[in-house]
Image (tube, helix red, strand yellow):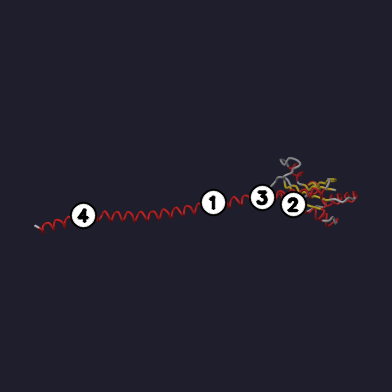
Amino acid sequence: MKNRQLVVFAGFVVLIALVVGPACATKKFVKTESATLDQKIVGVSTEVEASQKRIKEHDDKLATIGSLLTQQEGQIKAVDGKVEEVKTLIRGNLVMTATLKNSDAKFKFDSAELSPEATGILDQFVQKLIEENKGVFIEIQGHTDSTGPDEVNVVLGQKRAEAVMMYLYKQHRIPLHRMSVVSLGSSVPVVDNSNREGRSQNRRVEILVYE
């Protein structure tokens, strides 16, 4: 009888172990997985915070660069304004103008070479300067018609204006520091470019004399 009671008690203990054992193991597994998940969440949060910090720093740098560019642009405009002011002081008052028209200068297509007709007009211009006998500053502007791309016209206008300046320097010894050249391309037409005659008139070199 006593042995039978012991067997029953042992069976009861085994049953409890079978029921409670897996529950404890499951609870331990859950705790372990929860701890691991918490660590992963912390790691992700840290990475997100670091990314947000980098983005903010990047935005701050962009803002700083933008401010610097804006400041630099303002400084450039201020310098340009001073340059124009100095140019105005150097030039003084406009006292004489001359225009080297295409009909007279006979520039060949896409050429800056001065024809005999053109040099003759420049010689007359210099003779008039000598008669005036004044200290002057000469601005030479190159103009074209609207045929072709703007960038090509600007280059061509520059070449023609420089050809005039170099002729005045080499042939008549007008100092280079007393002259400047600028190309306005097709931006300042004197007549409409819609016909051949108008385009011919717009191809010109203008000489402005300042006292």
Q: Amino acid at mark 3?
A: Gln
Where, quadrant-wise, is the N terminus in this rendering? Answer: bottom left
Res. 189 image quadrant: top right
In the picture of the structure, the residue carrying the numbered disc 1 is 56
Looking at the image, residue 19 sits to the left or right of residue 195; the answer is left
The residue carrying pointer 4 sits among few (fewer than 14), some (14 to 19) or many (20 or more) residues within 10 Å by Cα, namely few
The residue carrying pointer 2 sits among few (fewer than 14), some (14 to 19) or many (20 or more) residues within 10 Å by Cα, namely many
Expressed as whole percent of the image width and height from the top left, the position of residue 203 reads 76, 46
The residue carrying pointer 1 sits among few (fewer than 14), some (14 to 19) or many (20 or more) residues within 10 Å by Cα, namely few
Check contact, mark 2 vs mark 4: CB within 8 A.
Answer: no
Q: Amino acid at mark 1?
A: Lys
User: Which dot, 1 or 3, sits closer to the camera?
Assistant: 1
In the picture of the structure, the residue carrying the numbered disc 2 is 158
Identified at 79% across, 52% down, the residue is 180
**Nearer to us in this view, 32 or 165:** 32
Q: Given the current orientation, which residue lies at the most extreme front position?
A: 2
Identified at 85% across, 50% down, the residue is 136
In the picture of the structure, the residue carrying the numbered disc 3 is 71
Of the residues under marks 2 and 4, which one precedes in the sequence?
4
User: Which dot, 2 or 4, sits closer to the camera?
Assistant: 4
Label 2: element kind: helix
Q: Amino acid at mark 4?
A: Ile
